[in-house]
Amino acid sequence: MAPDDAVIGAALERALGALQRLGPDGVRALRDADDPRVAAVMRILVRVSPVAFFAAPSLVPILASELVTRSLERGLAPATAYAMALIGLVLNMLGAHDAAHGWAQLALDLLPRWRDDRRLEASTRQVAQNLVDTFVVPLASTLDAGRAVFDVGRDTGDLEYAGYAAHVYTFNALYSGARPLGPLLDEALDLGGRMRAMGQLNANHVHAPFEQVLRALRGRTADPARLDGDGFDEAAAIAAATALGSRSGAMVVHTARGYVRLFLGDAVDALACLDQARAYFDAVPSLWHIPIVHLLGAAAAALAWDRLPADQRATQRAAIAASLDALRGYARHGAVNFAHKVALVEGVAALVDGDRAAARARLADAARAATDAGWHNDAGLAHELAARVDDAPAAALARARDAYAAWGATAKVQQLDAARAG
């Protein structure tokens, strides 16, 4: 039975209250645990946390609170660093991204304290660097450190977290728009091959859809708007995730399907996939899939607007408003990642409301900010949407083409070139 809100709230209140009273320096000053049983129990709690993350996310705050409380009451241990990262993840889930970042930094600072025991280094770095910090600091700036977690896990024998790190690095790199897609595809395929060779099937199940997204964007799938091919089958992947009760697996496949359909296929189909992904937000706490679905779902609604019936327009207008609120929340803590996304969705809202001048202005703001910061994917999308309201739509589409070309989205560039030639 999943814990109810009262149980979760009480556990968090106890742990966070103790942390706030001590502060980071107070935690650092605590002695190490002198009972090996305490350290052993904490290691067990660490090892069950990824299971909870994927199968029962409501247990994650309980595990984080228990790890923190044991550390503060019984003494610090290598698992304490992981505990600080995990409490950061929980705070991210609650929207307290700045506080989350602070405790994640403490987690990384504590790692050298147990330099002779690296068993939990990969897991700590994975949570702190790949799941927490990415919402506050520039996403592109986290990629090298995030990729390095794979090597740490491989070298220390933590193959489970090595696999998860490879997977998260891949989709963070994709979403950042900062890594050229050609080399990123090669890297993703190499990481996926290593993941499979190491027997990390759980990580592979959620990694494989993004191998296909990258193949599609590079023009290496039979149908650029589908994930099928190279041993991957969309329908089978969704059926398998459903049969296993893997909500995170279903979310990943629906998000990946929506991604390729938005950029390379039909906006109505993309909207349907992304709407399905929204139902699984609870299954991917503190992952970038959530803001991406907010962003792309709004864009898909705008691109499909003229073909939506009136009742669906009302539903999608409410969804756009909800996504805008969510992205503004992210931007309050990580403007460097989300301010231009807010501008883009504000432009979408104006577009569907028929305010062409406001849409044109906000989409121009979004495209300019995205271009300046190297978000080639978001810049291309902003220009593509701007073509709906621009006085010179061909020029807007040409700017979109340039942005997609800089990103390395070969298939998208080919589509735009074909449309212009036609």
Image (spheres, grey):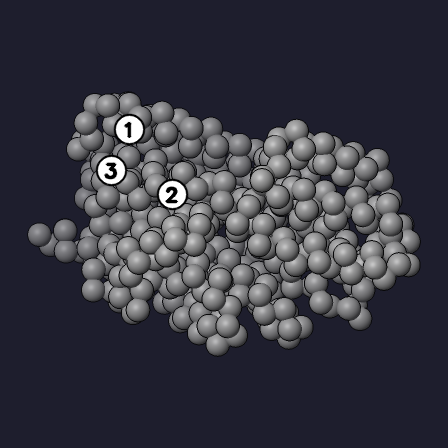
Residue 133 versus residue 154 in the image, above or below: above
Disc assigned to residue 303? 3
Q: Considering only order in the chain, which callout, 2 or 3, is on the residue closer to the N terminus?
A: 2
Image point 83% across, 59% down: which residue?
Answer: 37
Outermost residue, front direction?
1
Q: Disc 2 and disc 1: Cα gap in Å?
A: 24 Å
Q: Nearer the viewer, residue 119 or 362?
A: 119
Amino acid type, mark 2: Ala
Badge 1 element: helix
Q: Which residue is mark 2?
A: 277
On the image, the x and y values in percent for residue 150 come to 57, 68
Tell me, for residue 26, which label it has, or none.
none
Q: Residues within 10 Å of mark 1 (few under 14, many from 20)?
A: many
Can you say whether 222 is above or below 104 in the image? below
Residue 231 drawn above or below residue 404 = below
Label 3 – label 2 distance at C-alpha: 18 Å
Locate residue 17 relative to residue 349 in the image: left or right.
right
Q: For the residue marked with disc 1, what is the amino acid?
A: Leu
